[in-house]
Image (spheres, rainbow, N blue to C red):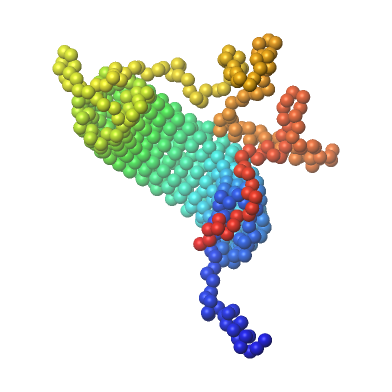
């Protein structure tokens, strides 16, 4: 090779001519039907800061992944991962870890080595117990452990959690705690979700001192009363107390001056305090499904309210002061006992949606003609259009002009005992009786003799079972876990392994194997590995 050729070859390799390649710091492999982590990831182990593997079919995380020591953000949500490897402790620089929506049963104790971790999301996993090492993540600001089947907390967990002084967001909802965790040391916490903890009677004394708290969700618990201590949360903006057994609200509620969203639907409230009108910042209020018969006149002082939901109560009339809520855009009064609406509602000029179905109204006030921005007014469930024409008529005897329609007078609402909900339990025996009474569909190509049985009843091997509700499914998964653990213990016994294959016994019941835990439906695996076009590299 000549000297000139060798010189040209060296020039081609010269970085000063072709420019340095930019290091890859972020890779997005989400929604790629992956069954294993692509090897391309490990090429950039020294420069990779963010890796997104969400919504794939991964069953395990390779050891090589935890050699990417520069990783700061790792998300593997919505996969089939059952074990979080111990080597996760190698990721010293990790700031965010998302392993939610998997089948992980245990968080390793050495998670405490990830000292830089600020966000940990392990929600929607069959985790039964939390590790002690979790309380040593002193830089943690966000912790999500909701829907994790948690039953047991470490003995000193409540006291140890006090070390997490930087914690700002905590979600432990939909678990099965038997003990309550006090939050006296979480002075910086701003967002707190403890909904659906149905094994414990909660007390708001545990949160009354959290002055930085802005979001609190205590829905679906057993709250019997709202303690005055809640007023200590002076910065509270969103308060959710739905689906409890509250009968009254304290008068001190009005001191929550920053409250913008307040939901107390599905309780047993018989009255609302007059101090409700002191919530000047309130924008959304939901008091549906209670035993209320009167709205306080102070509601007219809620000048910033935009959404007011008061369905399924016992209101006969509304206070005239409601017309002062001129910023309301959505007003729902469905399923009450309203006989008339105040003419002052014509002052609610920004009203866009009004739902007054299932009441006892005979007409609407003439002042409703001032509602120029009204886009939907629902008088009946059988309406075909959101807006219907209204005619002006004079009432006999008084001469008062009102607005009417062919849908007036309204029919009283159906009693709860007569309603049929789609959530009613499915009864296979009753369905079978109804099926036998139905006429059978015949096609010309079928022979009548083939469709009829000697007894006049056609036998069928089809069996219908009700779709389990989420709580029933959760119990099913827990039962399956205990059976699988028992099978594994028997397999390790000196008597020899137990056949874990799924078998059907004489009575038709199925035996359980390790596949029981794979309760998440998987999409069909991709035939090819994702091309480079599917990978988003930043």
Report whether 444 appears left or right of 376.
Answer: right
| Residue found at x 34% / y 35% | 285
> In percent of the image, x 50 and y 25: which residue is there?
422
Q: Measured along the vertical axis of the image, is residue 403 above or below residue 497?
A: above
> Residue 268: image x %, image y %?
41, 25
Question: Residue most toward the front?
Answer: 444
Q: Closest to the observer: 345 or 290?
A: 345
Q: Residue furthest right?
A: 495
Q: Quadrant of residue 337?
A: top left
At x 44%, y 27%, the residue is 245
Q: Nearer the viewer, residue 113 or 322?
A: 322
Total numbered badges shown on the rendered structure: 0
In the image, residue 152 sits, relative to residue 357, either above or below, namely below
Image coords of residue 479 (percent x, y): 66, 33
Task: Determine the residue positioned at 23% across, 35% down.
Answer: 372
Q: Residue 293 at what x, y percent from top left?
A: 32, 22
The outermost residue toward the left is: 399
Visible residue check, residue 491: yes
Q: Is residue 248 visible?
A: no
Image quarter where the N terminus lies is bottom right
Q: Quadrant of residue 486?
A: top right
Give left or right: position of 162 versus 111. Answer: left
Q: Give left or right: position of 534 versus 294.
A: right
Q: Position of residue 498 (x, y in %)?
A: 80, 37
Q: What residue occupies the far top of the structure in this picture?
A: 455
């Amino acid at each position: 090779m000549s000297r000139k050729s060798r010189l040209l070859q060296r020039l081609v390799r010269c970085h000063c001519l072709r420019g340095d390649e930019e290091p890859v710091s972020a890779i997005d492999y989400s929604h790629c039907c992956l069954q294993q982590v692509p090897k391309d990831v490990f090429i950039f182990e020294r420069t990779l800061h963010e890796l997104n593997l969400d919504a794939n079919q991964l069953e395990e995380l390779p050891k090589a992944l935890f050699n990417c020591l520069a990783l700061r953000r790792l998300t593997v949500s919505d996969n089939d991962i059952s074990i979080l490897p111990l080597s996760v402790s190698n990721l010293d620089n990790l700031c965010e870890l998302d392993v939610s929506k998997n089948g992980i049963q245990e968080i390793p104790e050495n998670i405490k080595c990830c000292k830089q971790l600020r966000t940990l999301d392990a929600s929607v996993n069959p985790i039964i117990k939390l590790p002690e090492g979790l309380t040593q993540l002193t830089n943690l600001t966000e912790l999500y452990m909701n829907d994790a089947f948690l039953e047991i907390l470490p003995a000193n967990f409540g006291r140890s959690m006090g070390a997490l002084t930087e914690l700002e967001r905590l979600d432990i909802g939909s678990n099965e705690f038997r003990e309550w965790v006090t939050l006296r040391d979480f002075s910086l916490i701003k967002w707190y979700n403890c909904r659906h903890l149905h094994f414990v009677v909660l007390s708001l004394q545990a949160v009354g001192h959290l002055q930085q708290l802005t979001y609190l969700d205590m829905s679906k618990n057993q709250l019997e009363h709202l303690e005055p201590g809640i007023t200590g949360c002076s910065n509270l903006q969103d308060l959710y107390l739905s689906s409890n057994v509250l009968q009254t609200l304290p008068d001190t509620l009005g001191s929550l001056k920053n409250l913008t969203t307040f939901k107390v639907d599905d309780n047993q409230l018989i009255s609302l305090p007059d101090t409700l009108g002191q919530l000047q910042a309130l924008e959304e209020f939901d008091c549906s499904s209670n035993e209320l018969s009167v709205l306080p006149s102070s509601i007219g002082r809620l000048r910033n309210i935009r959404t007011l939901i008061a369905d399924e109560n016992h209101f006969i009339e509304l206070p005239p002061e409601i017309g002062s809520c001129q910023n309301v855009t959505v007003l729902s009064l469905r399923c009450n006992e309203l006989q008339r609406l105040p003419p002052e509602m014509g002052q609610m000029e920004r009203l866009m949606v009004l739902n007054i179905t299932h009441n006892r109204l005979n007409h609407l006030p003439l002042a409703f003609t001032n509602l120029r921005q009204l886009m939907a007014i629902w008088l009946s469930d059988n309406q075909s259009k959101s807006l219907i024409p209204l005619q002006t008529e004079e009432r006999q005897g008084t001469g008062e002009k009102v607005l009417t329609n062919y849908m007036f007078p309204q029919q009283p609402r159906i009693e709860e005992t007569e309603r049929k909900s789609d959530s009613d339990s499915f009864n296979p025996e009753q369905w079978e009786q109804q099926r036998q009474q139905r006429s059978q569909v015949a096609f010309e190509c079928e022979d009548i003799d083939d469709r009829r049985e000697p007894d006049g009843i056609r036998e069928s091997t089809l069996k219908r079972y009700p779709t389990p509700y989420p709580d029933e499914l959760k119990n099913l998964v827990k039962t399956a876990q205990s059976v699988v653990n028992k099978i594994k213990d028997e397999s390790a016994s000196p008597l020899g392994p137990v056949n874990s294959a799924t078998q059907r016994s004489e009575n038709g019941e199925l035996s359980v194997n390790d596949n029981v835990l794979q309760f998440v439906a998987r999409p069909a695996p991709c035939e090819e590995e994702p091309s480079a076009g599917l990978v988003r590299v930043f």
